[in-house]
Amino acid sequence: MTNNEKEVLGLPIEDRRWPTNKYKNYTDLAIEDIEDFWDKEARNLDWYKSWDKVLEWKNPFAKWFVGGKINACYNAVDRHIKTEKKTKAAIIWEGEPGDTRVLTYLDLFREVNNFASALKKLGIKKGDKIAICMPMIPEFQIAILSSARIGAIFTVIFSGFSANALAGRINDSQAKLVITTDGGYRRGKVIELKNIVDDAVKETPSVKNVIVYKRVGNDIKMVNKRDHWWDDLVKNEISYVEPEQVESSHPLYILYTSGTTGKPKGVVHSTGGYLLYANRTTKWVFDVNDEDIYWCSADIGWVTGHTYIIFGPLSNGITSIMYEGAPDYPNKDRWWEIIEKYRVTILYTAPTAIRALMKFGDELPNKHNLKSLRILGTVGEPINPAAWEWYYNVIGGGRCPISDTWWQTETGGALISASPNLGLVPLKPGSATYPLPGIEADIVDEKGNVLENGRKGYLVIKKPWPGMFMGLYNDDVRYKEVYWSKFPGIYYPGDYALKDNDGYFWLLGRADEVLNVAGHRLGTIEIEDVLVSHSSVAESAVAGRPDDIKGEAIVAFVTLKQGYEPTEELRQELTKHVKVELSSIAVPSELYFVNTLPKTRSGKIMRRIVKAIASGKTVGDITTIEEEASVDEIRNALDSLKKK
């Protein structure tokens, strides 16, 4: 590890004991008897009927709270309107053009009931599938909650997908209804979302109706008898729809995750177990309270938005910010403006977004009053120490603990993270710290043997947890092969990691992103972290390409901070920096300067694209990419080397 990684922040460096016994008592109790632990935790939700059995475990399939009856929408909305929270803001929304709305819990209750009534009048019932493809507007949440209210199973499809990608997911889920908008805003441009949906629905015979919310007011074609304006469906509705009492294991949603190759996987999450895990981890990781103004910057199209924009925050009865636009549009300090404007107390975002904003320097965030912040969070990929320290010192003012969360679409919520609510441990920049209560994680070798601390290996989860997915939609064989076959009976998430001598977990990236260079295994994240630790580098992406001698050669792409120019001298300085800080084995064979890296619209670097280009392979679908020019830039950088 580098010297930066050995530093401990948040508490005095000499204090490595648990600050309180609460966290350790929780974790010990949970691992000792997971059924008793989760039985008690489940009392934080409202149930129509209690469960007969906490866990039915038929490895690798789990059913939680068997016999219990519950409704996710009731727990997110209804139970709060019976209290003083009914007049509290549930959603504070800001659109990209600057328009704003505030929905109290009572407002949300009324909107959800009216739309749920409209869904029922279109013939949607318990178990039916609904596809939702919308920009980040309050109606996105209303559509999801309304689906849950009537027991329909929703599948959210990111609004940046192509018509083909959209059609494939609709056909796989056999959705009867699509909910969308006329369009959406992105960096000042209108995304013609309805046109994309129309092209997709031509290939989806299961779809009988399309509901369209008018967001941008552009001219669109409405298909007679199939298409319905949202406002027309609800304008005469003043309704109450009794929440459907569903079984705890009733599917709440299907979310498709593509991975690096192959057909997208339909991840199925339950209602009771998933909702409980969303509720509890929101409390543990962010220490939420009634006074908080919480902001998760993710798109609801991804699982982070499902768990930590909708079900986690709402089931805890807190106020959330919802923002429609890009983090640096129309101004590069748009995020800092929003935090100051609404006095945000908790910010949860991706390391790539942090690095992208970090390259603009300290001046922009320093122009704004960010003192309302009390907790920071990260999600999506391991955060490098340099970005961690900037986030901690510049955005958090050196006073806000960082909950660096590790989890996946499949896990339903954070599995490894600091927990300000249960007792904050000393923080190490770049480490997700320890597993949360109820999560038994370890590091093993290729044969499944537990490794001693300090050795790199495969991350595994040894016991079931309520947030875990029920399986892959209509594909039990793939579910077993992908997640449970490498280490039989143990969940393998596909990540490479290590535990240090203090037992802290360090995530090193996807196992398929581990490079084999001359017999040495190196995580791409390790090399990227070292590059970003140099004062000139804003972001980096590392991939391997086949090499006859080394097995794999390291190819690195970097973007520079403002004030730095790409030169041969700087290239040499960066390669030397990698050699000094990590190893001569880790020195990139090729290092390119680029203006942008391929990213999703949620800000995550698309490493599969970098890897494909570096290896000379087909890139595949890039419809979710923020700037297609970034792909051409990487290609051109590689082509320029070949010409030389």
Image (tube, helix red, strand yellow):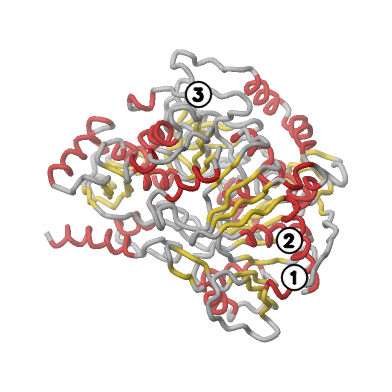
- Residue found 68% across the figure and 50% down from its top: 470
The Cα–Cα distance between marks 3 and 2, rounded to whole angstroms, is 47 Å
Is 155 situated left or right of 107 in this image?
Answer: left
Density class for disc 1 (Cα within 10 Å; few <14, some 14-19, many ≥20) is some
Is 65 situated left or right of 568 in this image?
Answer: right
Q: How many marks?
A: 3
The answer to whether one can see residue 521 in this image is: no
Residue receiving disc 1: 234
Residue receiving disc 3: 503
Tell me the element at label 1.
helix
Q: Amino acid at mark 2?
A: Glu
Residue 245 location, x and y as percent? Answer: 84, 54
Residue 355 location, x and y as percent? Answer: 37, 44
Q: Amino acid at mark 3?
A: Gly
Is 328 situated left or right of 372 in this image?
Answer: left
Residue receiving disc 2: 111
- Residue found 22% across the figure and 48% down from its top: 591
Which of pointers 1 and 3 indicates the residue nearer the eye? 1
Q: Amino acid at mark 1?
A: Val
The Cα–Cα distance between marks 1 and 3, rounded to whole angstroms, is 54 Å
The answer to whether the residue labelled 1 contacts the one labelled 3, judged by CB atoms less than 8 Å apart, is no
The answer to whether the residue labelled 2 contacts the one labelled 1, judged by CB atoms less than 8 Å apart, is yes
Which of pointers 3 and 2 indicates the residue nearer the eye? 2
